[in-house]
Image (tube, helix red, strand yellow):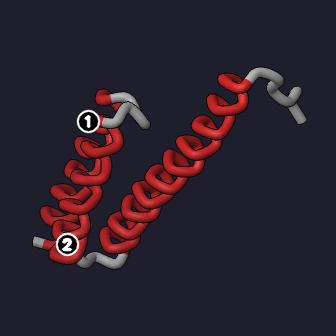
Amino acid sequence: MTEMPHSASAKKRLRQNVRSRDRNRAVKSEMKTAIRKVLEAISEKDVAAAKSLFNSVAKKADRAATSKMIHKNKAARIKSRLSARIVAAQSATD
């Protein structure tokens, strides 16, 4: 374990860091779960479900990028790769 803070401001900063770390982990976990659901829908050849789930992934990725939990380019990369997979799955089923 790391050293415990001594000053009042360092103690407060530790509390803030713990809160923000927990919040960041939760948001990133939600985003990864949503991505996994889209990939599962694509693997099951359910393009309509993948499209509807993609909207929630895009929203979560953009929100995370806006609050700087992930880099904005990572959010763009996630959306680009998923949309490319959805288009490929749609063309494969047609």
- Counting from the top left corner in percent of width and height, residue 5 is at 80, 26
Say which of 81 and 66 sits in front.
66
- Counting from the top left corner in percent of width and height, residue 45 is at 28, 76
- Identified at 65% across, 40% down, the residue is 15
> Viewed as shown, does residue 9 lie left or right of 59?
right
Q: CA distance from mark 1 to mark 2?
A: 21 Å
Q: Is residue 21 above or below residue 45?
A: above
Q: Look at label 2 and name its amino acid.
A: Val
Q: Residue furthest left?
A: 94
Q: Look at label 1 and name its amino acid.
A: Ala
Helix, strand or loop at disc 1? helix
Q: Residue furthest front?
A: 8
Write down the residue under mark 2: 47
Q: Residue 62 is drawn in which quadrant?
A: top left
- Counting from the top left corner in percent of width and height, residue 26 is at 51, 56
Query: Badges 1 and 2: C-beta atoms under 8 Å apart?
Result: no
Write down the residue under mark 1: 76
Query: Crowding near pointer 1: few (<14 within 10 Å), some, many (20+)?
Result: some
> Viewed as shown, does residue 68 lie left or right of 2?
left
Say which of 42 and 13 sits in front.
13
> Viewed as shown, does residue 3 lie left or right of 86?
right
> Viewed as shown, does residue 94 lie left or right of 14?
left
- Identified at 13% across, 62% down, the residue is 91
